[in-house]
Amino acid sequence: MATAEEIRATVARYTETMSAADKEGWLELFNPEASLEDPVGSDPHRGIEAVGAFFDLAQSLADSITLERTGPIRVAGHEAAFPMQAISDLGGVRMVIDIIDVMSFDDEARITSMRAFWDPAEMRPLDD
């Protein structure tokens, strides 16, 4: 089983690679059979190709996306949960949304399941 330290490192790379628009690095964090549900309640993306298509869609919706963790990564067994904010540049307007991600991991600390809890109605302008 992956250690808590390995899981935390995967979470850190997850936010770093998404923020850097590094699709290859981001996809390396996922198990080939992973599922991604973002936001919770939407149709899950299953398998690495579908997860990659989600990345492409997310990156196409904004000029940039920055993920910033806003609290600790809580690890229990092979799962983790953590709060963060997604800051998106939408045509020069910076918007922010609060998110809680819940992930499960395989023995190599690759993501097997990712669920993002957020409500689009709560997106708001970022006060710089």
Image (cartoon, rainbow, N blue to C red):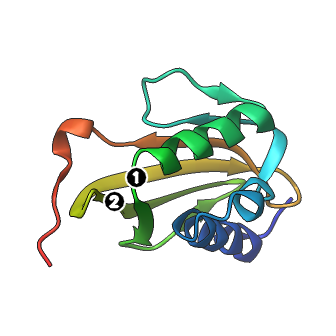
In-front residue for pair 16/82: 16
Residue pictured at 59% horizontal, 63% vertical:
21
Query: Percent from the top left, x then y, of residue 53?
Result: 65, 36
- As shown in the figure, which amino acid type bears the numbered disc 2? Ser
Circle 2 — which element?
Answer: strand
Circle 1 — which element?
Answer: strand
**Which quadrant does the N terminus fall into?**
bottom right
The CA distance from mark 1 to mark 2 is 16 Å
Residue pictured at 53% horizontal, 20% vertical:
43
Please rate how many residues cluster around mark 2, counting C-alpha atoms within 10 Å: few if below 14, some from 14 to 19, many from 20: many
| Cβ atoms under marks 1 and 2 closer than 8 Å | no
Query: Percent from the top left, x then y, of residue 127?
Result: 11, 72
In-front residue for pair 113/17: 17
- 29 sits left or right of 74 in the view: right
In the image, residue 26 sits, relative to residue 106, either above or below, namely below
- 50 sits left or right of 108 in the view: left
Residue 50 picture quarter: top right
Query: Percent from the top left, x then y, of residue 72?
Result: 45, 73
- 48 sits left or right of 127 in the view: right
In-front residue for pair 4/112: 112
Q: Which mark is residue 100?
A: 1
- 55 sits left or right of 65 in the view: right
**Mark 1 vs mark 2: which is more N-terminal?**
2
For mark 2, what is the residue? 88
Residue pictured at 82% horizontal, 46% vertical:
31
Say which of marks 1 and 2 sits in front.
2
In the image, residue 38 sits, relative to residue 9, either above or below, namely above
In-front residue for pair 50/62: 62
